[in-house]
Amino acid sequence: MSFFAILFALLIEQARPLARSNPVHAGLRAWSLSVSRNFDAGKPHHAWVAWGLAVVLPALLALAVHWLLLWGLGWPFAVLWNVAVLYLTLGFRQFSHHFTGLRDALEEGDEDRARELLARWQQVDVGDLPRSEIVRHVIEYSVLAAHRHVFGVLAWFSVMAALGIRPMGAALYRMAEFMARYCKRQRGIATQTASVALQRASATAWTAVDWLPARLTALCFAVVGSFEEAIEGWRFHAQRFPNDNDGVVLAATAGAINVRLGGEALRARVEWLASQGFEDDAESGDGGSTPGREPEVGHLRSVVGLVWRSVVVWLLLLALLTLALLLG
């Protein structure tokens, strides 16, 4: 059942991607912000209560609907609900148009246009970023987006499917990622709605939630890419990146397609920070670089192949598991 739910959700998401400004996501964001305002009193235990209500409660609701449909109407309706949850939590097409636009601009040699698109996508100050650095940042942002919008969701959905609670995993991962991203953007804001305690709780929880998916993504990249180099990068170069889980994914990517990643980080655009009431976040600091070739436009095609081959591997594994269960 998991294989068919994932397959149909991916096909629907490719054919009709969900708009970023859709009522479901807007409602979940409003719920998270409401919980933050009403239950986050600034103490650590308040922060964890707020995080649990914002993240775990929607996941439990998704599970409750799954069970009600399974027991009340039968497994076909439960499968449809799983497809709906995956469709809402996956986001393949939510970032792919940014990647395509940047790749086209770089292939045409229009570096000014590429800088403009990169700055607009990530709201960063690119300055006079050289061509190779533009490519590097596009690779890093795109790989992490693919991990968080595709492989992380699939990993948690599959893990929870093994426990019989399929949709809870996808909803939990997506809500945990949103809370971590929302709270990170609260740092330095004058009228922040998330306390320091909630920011720390969200970051700690997100690190734990993303620990297994990050390593499964890295392993998958190693299998479909250059295995030895990817594993070596994972083991010896992941610490070059500020975030441990992101470092595992990026270091494995660097080895899998033989490209240099890591280095100076881009800073958020001053005008965007001012409009949001933020100060510059120094935590997104710089790290070292991995070994590998200088980033080139050809590496962007390698990234696309890496991601799609990994999706195929996920589907094949789930298909084999589904077949084994049916025959067993």
Image (cartoon, rainbow, N blue to C red):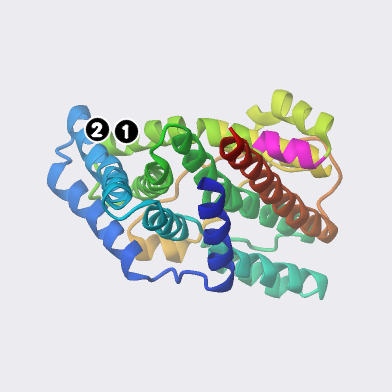
Give how far across and how far down residue 98 sits, in percent: 61, 68
Report the quarter where the C terminus lies: top right
The quadrant in which residue 106 appears is bottom right
Dot 2 or dot 1: first in sequence order is 2
Magenta highlight: main SS: helix
Which residue is most to the top?
A: 235
Lateral position of residue 265 relative to residue 130, left or right: left
**Label 2 environment density (alpha carbons within 10 Å; few <14, some 14–19, many ≥20):** some
- The residue stretch that appears in magenta: 218-225
Q: Amino acid at mark 1?
A: Ala
Q: Residue at x 69, y 45 (%)?
A: 316
The reply to whether residue 17 is in sight is yes
Q: Say whether residue 223 is magenta.
A: yes
Against 184, is 76 above or below?
Answer: below
**Pick the front one: 277 or 213:** 213
Give the residue drawn at x 61%, y 39%.
Answer: 286
Provide residue 144's location: percent of width, then percent of height: 59, 48
Q: Going by the image, does 122 lie left or right of 55?
A: right
Image position, residue 287 (x, y; %):
64, 36
Q: Secondary structure at mark 1?
A: helix
Q: Are marks 2 and 1 in contact (CB under 8 Å)?
A: yes
Q: Quarter-wise, where is residue 42 in the image?
A: top left
Residue at 46% from the left image edge and 55% from the top image edge? 86
Name the residue carrying label 1.
Answer: 201
Is 176 left or right of 147, judged from the image as shown? Answer: left
Q: Which residue is mark 2?
A: 48
Residue 118 on the magenta segment: no
Residue sitting nearer the eye, 4 or 128: 4
Q: Give me the residue at 80% from left, 54% from top.
A: 302
Q: Name the side, left or right, on which 26 lies relative to 305.
A: left
Mark-to-mark CA distance, 2 and 1: 6 Å
